[in-house]
Image (cartoon, grey):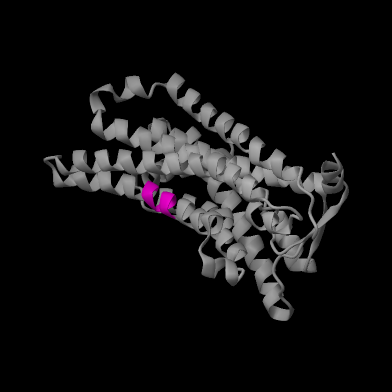
Amino acid sequence: MDHINYTWTQNFILGGFTTTGILQSLAILGTLCIYLLILAGNLFIIVLVQADSRLSTPMYFFISVLSFLELWYVSTTVPTLLHTLLHGFLHISSASFFIQLYVFHSLGLTECCLLGVMALDRYFAICHPLHYHVLMSRQVQLWLAGATWVAGFSAALVPTSLTATLPFCLKELDHYFCDLAPLMRLACVDTSWLNQVHVVVIGMINACNLVLILGLYGGILRAVLKLPSAASRAKAFSTCSSHMIVVALFFGSAFIVYVGLPEIQAEDMGKFIALVYAFLTPFLNPIIYTLRNKEVKAAVRRVIPRIRTVLKGP
């Protein structure tokens, strides 16, 4: 009980990135611009999918769900990043610290599960086209989307609540948001047992989804290679490659930080790598799913004239 009281009565300090002068100004301006672009890009995808009936397919439904998730995901970290860039550090209460820790990891695990669902959707579309609309009915889409959020927010409760009971000898975290991996280094006690819990909960969820995605895309690859038309094969590869780029960015950067390469941890580069999955991936997702997609480009050409007409009024 003393451990719990000690943890929750102290404040934490986020060290963030140390910058001065013109570099500080550029970092703040660049971060703010990218953050606004992330919000605009993901909102644009959500509105576009809702506005264009030809995008009313399971694939674009899940892309819009991913965009909605990214809006919240990036908004849990960028405000504290901007504060640390501006002031050099951020004092944060224990309650706020662990709330951010929980929300960030809940959204991260939700995205992990959602990427698996998106791979399943592509597998059904390409490998079982005749039964696709039955397998991915609107009810199934809503159920799968809801299940990813329930799974993510439920799974994150275990590592977050257990970590909150630890006593922490140091309260200054050399990071720009409340992340689990660097926080564990501040504990006053042996955390090997808790690391095993993290591996079981977070590691298993990520590993199972990654194995699922790779297995499904293995089946997709075999099916695509059997298609008689070169144009059909190119379209299938184009659609799937967008998803695989996002998967590689998300899982690759998370693996480096949480599984840990010794040289990365020794050089304290974890917070720089974390920028990839916490900041860069939400920025690239709208670009990957729109600029490389002919259907989205066609939808933009159809929707923009309608928006202009509405703005002009009667």
Q: In which quarter of the image is residue 59?
A: top left
- Quadrant the N terminus occupies: top right
Q: Specify whether residue 234 is in view.
A: yes
Where's residue 22, x and y in %? Answer: 70, 79
Say whether residue 19 is left or right of residue 200.
right
Residue 197 occupies quadrant: top right
Q: Is residue 297 left or right of residue 77?
A: left
x and y, in percent, of residue 106 in the image: 61, 40
The image quarter containing residue 103 is top right
* Residue 244 covered by magenta stretch: yes
Q: What stretch is highlighted in magenta?
A: 243-248
Q: Foreground: 131 or 14?
A: 14
Q: Left or right: 131 with respect to 116?
A: left
Q: Which of 118 and 93 is in front in this view?
A: 93
Which x, y percent locates residue 206? 48, 43
Q: Which residue is drawn at 73% across and 67% down?
A: 85
Is 174 placed left or right of 232 in the picture? Answer: right
Q: Please tell me whether residue 131 belongs to the stretch shown in magenta.
A: no
